[in-house]
Amino acid sequence: MTVKREVKEGIQLQGADETITYKITSTPWGATPTSLDAKIYSYNIDTAAYSDVTSSNMTGTASANGDVITLPSIHSLTAGTRYRVEVKFTSSGNVFEPYFWIHAQR
């Protein structure tokens, strides 16, 4: 059975002035996640280039409670920009990095 890396909930919509702390469940990839890391990248659709904007658009650190990973708060997005959020963790000696998309709105 193949598990997709992209979370099943699809593109998330977030207002440019909103601050949201997202949660994902590690269960499709593995249980009891450790060694958590999260990053956010802005995506330029014209050039297919990614820019790491973690330092300006994420605050805090990722944490886990059971199989639920709580991400750092995501904020200060630019309306009309698409962002890719990557969540890296270890489970049973395997390293996984699922991701999801955010489309920032006005």
Image (tube, rainbow, N blue to C red):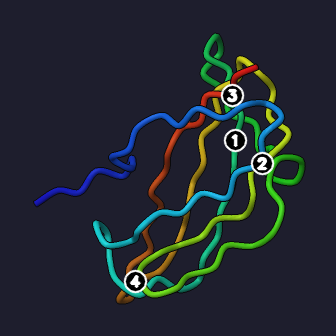
Residue 84, placed above or below residue 27: above
Residue with the mark numbered 3: 104
Which mark is drawn over residue 91?
Answer: 4
Label 3 – label 2 distance at C-alpha:
11 Å
The residue located at (39%, 47%) in the rendering is 6
Which mark is drawn over residue 61?
Answer: none
Which comes sooner in the sequence, label 1 or label 2? Answer: 2
Question: Counting other residues with Cα less than 10 Å from the Cα at mark 4, is it few (<14), some (14-19), or many (20 or more)?
Answer: some
Residue 42 % position (x, y)? 71, 33
Q: Type of residue at label 1?
A: Tyr
Q: Quadrant of residue 102?
A: top right
Q: Type of residue at label 2?
A: Thr
Q: Quadrant of the C terminus?
A: top right
- Residue that protrudes farthest toward the left in the picture: 1
Which comes sooner in the sequence, label 3 or label 2? Answer: 2
Residue with the mark numbered 1: 41
Which mark is drawn over residue 19?
Answer: 2
Viewer-proximal residue, 10 or 6?
10
Which comes sooner in the sequence, label 3 or label 1? Answer: 1
Badge 3 element: strand
The residue located at (43%, 68%) in the rendering is 96
Which comes sooner in the sequence, label 4 or label 2? Answer: 2
For the residues bearing labels 1 and 2, Cβ distance under 8 angstroms: no
Please indicate whether residue 65 sits to the left or right of residue 27 in the image. Answer: right
Residue 4, placed above or below residue 30: above
Badge 1 element: strand
